[in-house]
Amino acid sequence: MAASSPSPASMSGHELNRCLFNALKNGNTQQVIQLCKIAPQGPLHVTSIHKDTVLHLACYSKQKDLAIQLVGMLPNTPNRSLTKVINDVGNTLLHETATSDRMEDVATLLLEKNSELLSAKNVQGETPLFRAARFGKIRQFKLLAREVDKDNDAEGWKYQFFSDDQTSILHIAVITEHFDLALLIVRTYPDLIDMKDGNSMTALQHLACNPSAFAGTSELGLFKKLIYYCIPDKKGTVEEDDDTKGTDTKRYVKWLLKLLMWEELRREKYKHTSAWELAKVLIEKDTSWEATERTALNKGKKTDQEKTDGSSGLLLKTGREGLFIDCKKLDENQGQCLDEKMPKTSMTGIRRDETPLFLATSWRIKKLVVEILNHYPQAVEHVDKKGRNILHVAIQYRQLEIFEMVIENGMLARRLLRATDAKGNSLLHMVGKNRKGPKMETSEGPALDLRDQLVWFEKIKDLVKSDFVHLFNHKIQTAEYLFAKNYSKLHEESRKWLEETSKNCTIVAVLIATVAFTAAYTVPGGNQTNGKPVLLSRPFFVVFTLADVISLSLALMSVVSFLSILTSPFRLQDFRDSLPQKLTRALTYLILSVAMMMLAFAATIILIIHNKQSWTEIALSSALFVPVLFFAYSYSPLYAQLVKAWSYLFDLIVKRIYPGRKDGRQNPNQYPLDRSQRSGCQITEV
């Protein structure tokens, strides 16, 4: 900085702003103080193009010492004009300090200057308290909450706790995944648990839409899993926002922990732990499942709706019980009841008025589903506005684990399996519909995806009664017709994928057979004048011969298997068992042929080394085998998925041999809940 301070006459407005902005950017506290002394409005001088003052920028950039000095430059008398010092988005100085726990002392000084800052809202309708909840700053939240609790009544709390779009501080803490703060809010203000936002969603509903909030180590590698399980559940280190500089040793330890991914995984595990503690508290207060749609038994008579549109939702066999849900004002395009209209919340995007149980089922959060059914077992019978029960939702979103868990209860399985929704769709119809929800990224091709859908269909078909198989929905569609219609595109993609895969693998198999056939006439070491191999007496020559013959045989078997796939009719049902099994056998032969070729190459190399041949030939032979290894590695994920095709066949065989065999648990009439939390009463199968 220059020795003498510039005077107002020698510095234009743009030049002053440039110097202030650069000084703030570089953290030059003394220069900022000097420039503020000559600025017309001091610390409240507008510096940025977004109408941020110097004090705004100091608070936003977390320069605590500078901000304290700038606040000290403000008049000591109550300054009511501070509520009018806002930037383009309506943030006051307190809004900016609320985003950092490091600025807690600055927030205290600002409140001493003007307590009305606490009630100021920005253009999004957020108070400083709401903004602290949005950014998950616990210390700032506690400070501001204490001030709010002093003088506010019920209306004042509503003003402070909710934004203009009806999102509460609990909602925003859950949405932004600050679950430790959300847990604090729940314990301090329990009345917010049942509050709904503009989408008519509670905090538990938002939590049930976030599968990443709950522990799941399946996506972690082995090394990360070991670190994850070694980390304690409690929060062990200070937040990054704490006002601690630390010594060189502490900085080195922190750097080392980051290098070992300890800090990243610690935060992840702490998030999972906090989310689970929050979920258990919210579930205890949740009774949304009680608001179920009334059902009526349909015993063979057409309903008024069916008489007007000419459709039939009845069973072909007269007198069979089926559940029918009457939902007036049903939107045929969206499948939702239009009895009420509610505004959308900008933060949450779409409207989701399903219960937490159904949302957790849709997002495959089995842990949350189990906890809800543990507290309220009768919630399993909840029916939504579309007439769906939990099995309809589990099937539509292909949540196999949750589906199997629910049907293990023998008493309720019969009723749930017989139920139809508001459009007359049975569980089989739900399989016939296109899968909803985010699809998991796997290495499976379309043929294997189609196989999974067919296995789902057969599994549900075995569970429901035979007269439900030919049930018509309100559009006069059977489940089989609906499945064939909705999966016709996937059927065609599966056929093309299987043809291309078989053609490409056939070329590879023929190439391997050609190499193996050629190797039989160009044996290592050459032949004698009488035609006998020179290395015939070597032990590894026998290994080479056997490996080469087996490789040739397996390659030819693979070619025949792939040709049988190419000549198949590609019927829809063939993709369930026949075609995946043929592809599994063909790839097995091909991979074993590659392995035998590798063994033959290894035997050749050993024979050449033993015969003291040129190392150049050894290097060339080794290089030729690299593509073989790469091929085996590339097709190993596909082969691993194809092995699953045999599991369904194995289950069918076991089921036919042991028809009374039950999978899973000793008592099928209980949910798989924790033993310490299960009810002591026994359910008798009817």
Image (spheres, rainbow, N blue to C red):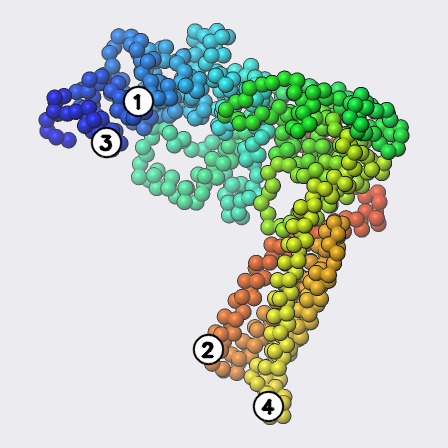
Q: Where does the N terminus fall, quadrant-wise?
A: top left
* Residue placed under numbered mark 2 in the picture: 616
Whether residue 527 sits left or right of residue 136 in the image: it is right
Badge 2 marks a residue whose secondary structure is helix
Q: Position of residue 14 (x, y in %)?
A: 20, 26
* Residue placed under numbered mark 1 in the picture: 51
For marks 4 and 1, give the CA distance: 94 Å
Which residue is rendered at x = 79% and y = 23% of the image?
A: 308
Q: Is residue 305 above or below residue 543?
A: above
Q: Where does the C terminus fall, quadrant-wise?
A: top right
Q: Position of residue 9 (x, y in %)?
A: 12, 21
Q: Position of residue 307 (x, y in %)?
A: 81, 24
**Mark toward the viewer: 4 or 1:** 1
Task: Report if residue 665 is visible in the image.
Answer: no
Query: Please, what is the three-letter code of the amino acid marked with disc 3?
Result: Asn
For marks 2 and 4, give the CA distance: 23 Å
* Residue placed under numbered mark 4 in the picture: 528
Mark 4 touching mark 1, by CB under 8 A?
no
**Mark toward the viewer: 3 or 1:** 1
Earlier sequence position, callout 2 versus callout 4: 4
For marks 3 and 2, give the CA distance: 65 Å
For marks 3 and 1, give the CA distance: 16 Å
Query: Please, what is the three-letter code of the amino acid marked with disc 2?
Result: Thr
